[in-house]
Image: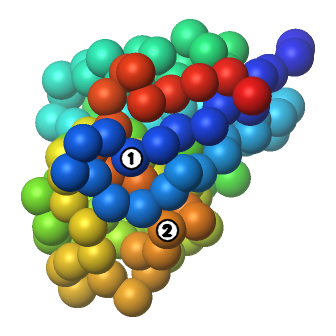
């Protein structure tokens, strides 16, 4: 299957990025970790990339299969967990570098305040 790379830019008041998500045959899951609520941002990333959309709270996904993680964290642990693992992280909240893993939150792997209009195929 062919996947499309996308560019994801920060939204108004957001931080980081832009980041590029480049799925492949192995990393082809967009995992949202948002307490079960399916954000429009995650749906748009999956739609444009051709990746499978997975609720990370109800289903476990090996890190090696995650093309991108979509979170809604206001500044605690989730902001840094996926960047620490080298997984591109999209926060739908406007949170910058904060929390106990702030040292892993870097502009090239993390972007926040993201809305669907901040995502484009490249």
- Label 2 Cα crowd, 10 Å radius (few <14 / some 14-19 / many 20+): some
Question: Image point 62% across, 37% down: which residue?
Answer: 7
Q: Earlier in the sequence, mark 1 or mark 2?
A: 1
Question: Image point 16% across, 36% down: which residue?
Answer: 35
For the residues labelled 1 and 2, the Cα–Cα distance comes to: 10 Å
Res 15 visible:
yes
x and y percentages locating residue 90 in the rendered image: 40, 46
Using residue 43 as the reference point, say whether residue 108 is left or right of it: right
Using residue 106 as the reference point, say whether residue 58 is left or right of it: left
For residue 105, above or below residue 23: below
Specify the color scheme.
rainbow
x and y percentages locating residue 27 in the rendered image: 72, 40
Residue indicated by mark 2: 107
Question: Image point 41% across, 74% down: which residue?
Answer: 105
Quarter of the image for residue 43 reads: top left
> Given the current orientation, which residue lies at the most extreme front position?
12
Residue indicated by mark 1: 10
Question: Residue 94 bears which disc, if any?
Answer: none
Question: Image point 59% across, 24% down: which residue?
Answer: 120
| The N terminus lies in quadrant | top right
Quarter of the image for residue 41 reads: top left
Question: The residue tagged with tag 2: helix, strand or loop?
Answer: loop
Res 59 visible:
no
Question: The residue tagged with tag 1: helix, strand or loop?
Answer: loop
Quarter of the image for residue 97 reads: bottom left
x and y percentages locating residue 69 in the rendered image: 45, 45
- Label 1 Cα crowd, 10 Å radius (few <14 / some 14-19 / many 20+): many
């Amino acid at each position: 299957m062919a996947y499309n790379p996308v560019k994801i830019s920060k939204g108004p008041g957001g931080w980081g990025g832009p980041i590029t998500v480049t799925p492949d045959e192995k990393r082809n899951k967009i995992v949202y970790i948002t307490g079960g609520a399916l954000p429009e941002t995650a749906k748009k990333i999956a739609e444009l990339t051709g990746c499978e959309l997975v609720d990370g709270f109800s289903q476990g996904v090996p890190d090696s299969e995650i093309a991108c993680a979509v979170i809604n964290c206001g500044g605690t642990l989730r902001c840094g967990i996926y960047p620490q693992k080298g997984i591109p992280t999209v926060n739908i909240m406007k949170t910058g570098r904060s929390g106990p893993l702030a040292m892993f939150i870097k502009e090239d792997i993390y972007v926040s305040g993201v809305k669907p209009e901040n995502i484009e195929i490249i």
